[in-house]
Image (cartoon, rainbow, N blue to C red):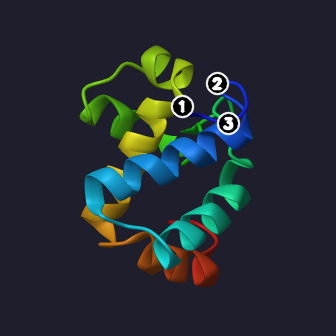
Amino acid sequence: MAPARFGTATYNRWYARQYMGRKYRWDGAQYTALVAMWQRESSWRHKARNPSGKYLGIPQTSAAVVRGNGYTVAQYMASPEIQVEVGLRYIRARYGTPAKAWSFWRSHHWY
């Protein structure tokens, strides 16, 4: 059963843990790395936008990445679940794991 309300930071973290475990078999250190990185990116707020407006949602992905995953920006911004899916897909494609993405983030403050 999901904790808290849909769209809260608590729910968003819970959903990410469930999804990454089921889809990629990531848990433990991978989840810890993801929590730390996305906390710094968006505080796990699915309506977050960076000051320029270019990066969106929990994982702070660009509109181009969103559209490249088959979603509209409106669909993406309305759904923390879609944001988790898109963000983890990006991490897997670019870095392999959340821990590797977090390692890069700690040096560059972006991923």
- Counting labels gives 3
Q: Secondary structure at mark 2?
A: loop
**Type of amino acid under label 3:** Pro
Residue that label 3 marks: 3
**Type of amino acid under label 1:** Pro
Q: Secondary structure at mark 3?
A: loop
Q: Name the residue located 73 percent from the left edge and 32 percent from the top edge.
A: 4
| Label 1 environment density (alpha carbons within 10 Å; few <14, some 14–19, many ≥20) | many
> Which label sits in the foreground, 1 or 3?
3
Is residue 108 left or right of 95 when viewed as pictured? right
Q: Is residue 87 above or below residue 28?
A: above
Asked whether disc 1 touches disc 3, contact meaning CB atoms under 8 Å apart, the reply is no
Q: Name the residue located 27 percent from the left edge and 52 percent from the top edge.
A: 23
Residue that label 1 marks: 80
The location of residue 98, given as percent across then percent down, is 44, 70
Taking depth in this image into account, of 92 and 21 the one nearest to the observer is 21
Asked whether disc 2 touches disc 1, contact meaning CB atoms under 8 Å apart, the reply is yes
Is residue 61 left or right of 68 when viewed as pictured? right
Q: CA distance from mark 2 to mark 3?
A: 9 Å
Residue that label 2 marks: 6
| Label 2 environment density (alpha carbons within 10 Å; few <14, some 14–19, many ≥20) | some
| Label 3 environment density (alpha carbons within 10 Å; few <14, some 14–19, many ≥20) | few
Quarter of the image where one finds residue 7: top right
The location of residue 71, given as percent across then percent down, is 32, 23
